[in-house]
Image (cartoon, rainbow, N blue to C red):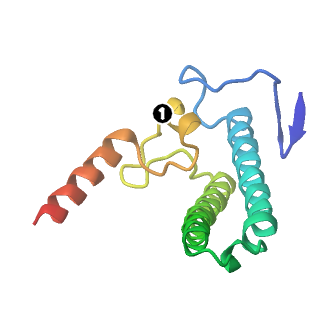
């Protein structure tokens, strides 16, 4: 058992749709999941800074080697940018846990299914609202 925040989360706990939605144990489960994900992303980005960004690969005299290194470098920076945005979304989700809005669809106010939250803990829309949103984006993109 681990203790963090206000609720004790049993060791092999998995939230289900059968229990009260966003009860203290479920909230703490998602809080711990989000914090662990954020820590993993931060650790990965520290490794990138030390390994990739400080390497001298970009100073190689061979043009093909340098081009390859620059491509790798650009890809790494794009990955880090995506991770930075993800960390922002994780922090926003943690704030929603604190203000009791976590797990509820921003559009409908209905609970987001536990399965969806477990798979994508930063989800802010129910599956139906997300699909509606994506259909609208496709429609506007095609115009």
Judged from this view, the residue extending furthest toward the left is 143
Q: Secondary structure at mark 1?
A: loop
Q: Position of residue 5 (x, y in %)?
A: 84, 46
Q: Which residue is painted at 77% across and 21% down in the image?
A: 12
Most foreground residue, 31 or 86: 86
Q: Nearer the viewer, residue 136 or 68?
A: 68
Quadrant (top left, top right, bottom left, bottom right) of the N terminus: top right
The residue located at (54%, 42%) in the rendering is: 120
The residue under label 1 is 113
x, y (%) of residue 119? 55, 36
Number of residues whose C-alpha sits closer than 10 Å to that of mark 1, classed few (under 14), some (14–19) or many (20 or more):
some
Q: Where residue 114 appears, x then y in whole percent?
A: 54, 32
Nearer the observer, 41 or 10: 41
Residue 89 sits in quarter: bottom right
Q: Is residue 132 left or right of residue 27?
A: left
Residue at point 56%, 63% (across, down): 82
* Residue 101 horizontal side relative to residue 55, left or right: left
User: For this view, does 8 lie left or right of residue 136?
Assistant: right
Q: Is 19 situated left or right of 37 in this image?
A: left
């Amino acid at each position: 058992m681990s203790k963090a925040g206000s609720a004790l989360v049993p060791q092999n706990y998995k939230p289900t749709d059968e229990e009260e939605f966003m009860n203290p144990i479920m909230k703490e489960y998602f809080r711990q999941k989000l914090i662990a994900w954020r820590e993993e992303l931060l650790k990965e980005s520290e490794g990138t800074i030390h390994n990739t960004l400080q390497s001298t690969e970009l100073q190689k005299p061979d043009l093909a080697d340098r081009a390859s290194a620059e491509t790798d470098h650009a890809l790494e920076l794009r990955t880090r940018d995506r991770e930075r945005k993800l960390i922002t979304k994780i922090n926003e989700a943690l704030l929603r846990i604190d203000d009791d809005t976590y797990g509820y669809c921003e559009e409908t106010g209905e609970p987001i299914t536990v399965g969806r939250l477990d798979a994508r803990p930063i989800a802010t829309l129910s599956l139906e609202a997300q699909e509606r949103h994506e259909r609208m984006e496709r429609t506007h993109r095609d115009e």
